[in-house]
Image: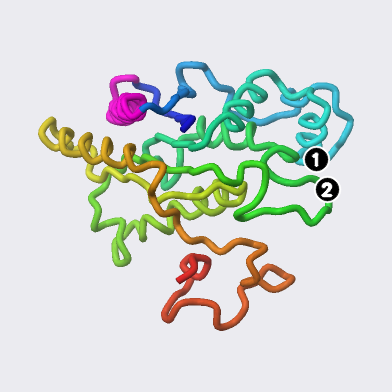
């Protein structure tokens, strides 16, 4: 497989950096081709603005990105990342959980690279989303370092279930653009992670990378699968017994 790793951490010697290195080594040892987008090292511009589009007259910002994509006037750094995505069979996002989300520089990669017309449709057309689109068929996975202990990110944990925290990324970014979303690889309690435990975590991550092509994706409901009405509201009776919230959008 061709695997694109998008990595965000300001310190190369961080735990997130070490996990990225473990993943790259294992993937290459297994015969995969790997490219790494190191956002901090490349000085990635996080803020999306009209300078990304070139000479585009469209006033709507979203549609302007689509015009720029269509006309080939997107800035070179955006075009390069889009080419990597088209090359990739799998995309792995490596980042620490900051304020219940990804670092701003990685969110800026999402904002700038997943443009209208490339990652999702343009205008008022009935274009495919949620399980369909240009990026359909690619596999996507998160590798996330979490400072807090696992119980605090559970159903009764003060931080809420980690599945809910990651839903905007899993469902609202990766699945929205058509990718098959794999269960995340999470490392909790990272502030107290010592060398012996890192060895165990690295072993688990190597195993996960070796299974990247075979892992069963999260069974999100596709927009075109018949589970939603015309207003994109889940039809009554489609949910599993007791399902609620974000869990409604995972098929039983």
Magenta part of the chain: 12-30
Residue at disc 2, secondary structure? loop
Quickly name the residue at label 2: 123
Q: Is residue 27 magenta?
A: yes
Decide: marks 1, 2 in contact (CB < 8 A)?
A: yes
Mark carried by residue 27: none
Residue at image position (73%, 40%) is: 116
Left of 24 or right of it: where is 117? Answer: right
- Relative image position of residue 155 (x, y in whole percent): 32, 66
Q: Main secondary structure of the magenta part?
A: helix
- Relative image position of residue 234 (x, y in whole percent): 61, 73
Quickly name the residue at label 1: 63
Where 8 falls versus 180 (above or below)?
A: above
Residue at image position (50%, 77%) is: 239
Residue at disc 1, secondary structure? helix
Residue at image position (67%, 24%) is: 79
Dot 2: few (<14), some (14–19), or many (≥20) neighbours within 10 Å?
A: few
Q: Residue furthest right?
A: 57
Of labels 1 and 2, earlier in sequence is: 1
- Depth check: give the residue in front, 44 or 82: 82
- Depth check: give the residue in front, 42 or 174: 174
Q: Quadrant of residue 147?
A: top left
Left of 52 or right of it: where is 46? Answer: left
Q: Is residue 200 magenta?
A: no
Figure quadrant of the C terminus: bottom left
Left of 54 or right of it: where is 102? Answer: left
Q: Quadrant of residue 92?
A: top left
Q: Residue furthest left?
A: 196
Residue at image position (48%, 55%) is: 167
Where 225 falls versus 148 (above or below)?
A: below
- Depth check: give the residue in front, 65 or 60: 65
- Relative image position of residue 88 (x, y in whole percent): 54, 32
């Amino acid at each position: 497989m061709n695997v694109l790793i998008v990595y965000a951490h300001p310190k190369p010697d961080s735990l997130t950096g070490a996990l990225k290195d473990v993943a790259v080594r294992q993937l290459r040892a297994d015969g995969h081709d790997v490219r790494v987008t190191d956002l901090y090292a490349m000085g990635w511009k996080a803020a999306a603005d009209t300078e990304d589009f070139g000479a585009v007259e469209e006033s709507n910002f979203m549609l302007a990105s689509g015009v720029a994509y269509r006309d080939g006037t997107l800035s070179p750094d955006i075009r390069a990342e889009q080419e990597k995505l088209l090359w990739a069979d799998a995309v792995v996002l490596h980042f620490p959980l900051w304020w219940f989300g990804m670092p701003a520089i990685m969110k800026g990669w999402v904002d700038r690279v997943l443009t209208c017309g490339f990652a999702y449709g343009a205008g008022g057309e009935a274009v495919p989303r949620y399980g369909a689109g240009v990026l359909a068929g690619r596999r996507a996975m998160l590798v996330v370092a979490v400072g807090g202990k696992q119980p605090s990110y559970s159903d009764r944990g003060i931080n809420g279930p980690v599945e809910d925290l990651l839903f905007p990324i899993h469902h609202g970014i990766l699945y929205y653009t058509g990718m098959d979303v794999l269960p995340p690889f999470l490392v909790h309690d990272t502030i107290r992670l010592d060398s012996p435990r890192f060895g165990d975590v690295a072993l688990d991550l190597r195993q996960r990378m070796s299974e990247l092509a075979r892992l069963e994706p999260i069974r999100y409901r596709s927009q075109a699968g018949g589970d939603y009405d015309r207003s994109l509201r889940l039809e009554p009776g489609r949910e599993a017994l007791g399902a609620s919230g974000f869990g409604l959008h995972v098929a039983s």
